[in-house]
Image: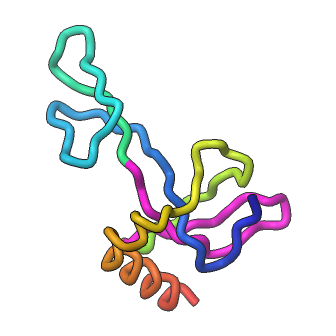
Amino acid sequence: MRWNRGQVVVFPKQKYSPAPGPRAREVDAAPGGETYSYLVDKFWIVKETLADGRLVVLTRGGKEHVLRHDDHSIRGLSLLERLRHRQRLQDLLSVLKKAG
């Protein structure tokens, strides 16, 4: 898929903690049962596409990440997600505007 500036991507990020949050999915307990590993969907916005195809994305806090464009875990938003997370998307757009 070709990604353009301003498109929102969903990236499942691996997390570890003693208490997964409400957005956690694919939760697995550690052998001792003291911590859990799980995935949380992160909503990031494309700032730019580099010459080699990698994506520079921004978080709602303005932090930059570089992702491979061919990473199969990256996906676009569904219509339901666009409706459900309207405020989150507005926050991302304002971060992109500030970043220039």
Q: Position of residue 5 (x, y in %)?
A: 66, 78
| Vertical position of residue 86 compared to residue 49: above or below | below
Is 40 in the magenta? Answer: no
Residue shown at the point (70%, 67%) measured from the top left: 3
| Vertical position of residue 53 compared to residue 45: above or below | above
**Residue at the extreme top:** 31
Residue shown at the point (70%, 74%) measured from the top left: 4
**Residue at the extreme front:** 80
Which secondary structure is most common in the magenta stretch? strand
Quarter-of-image position of residue 69: bottom right
Quarter-of-image position of residue 32: top left
Is 49 in the magenta? Answer: yes
Quadrant housing the C terminus: bottom right
Q: Nearer the viewer, residue 11 or 96?
A: 11
Q: Position of residue 66 (x, y in %)?
A: 62, 58
Q: Position of residue 91 (x, y in %)?
A: 36, 80
Taking the image as shown, residue 60 lies to the left or right of residue 54, namely: left
- Residue range corresponding to the magenta coloring: 41-60
Give the image's coloring scheme: rainbow
Q: Nearer the viewer, residue 93 or 82?
A: 82
Taking the image as shown, residue 72 lies to the left or right of residue 81, namely: right
**Residue at the extreme right:** 51
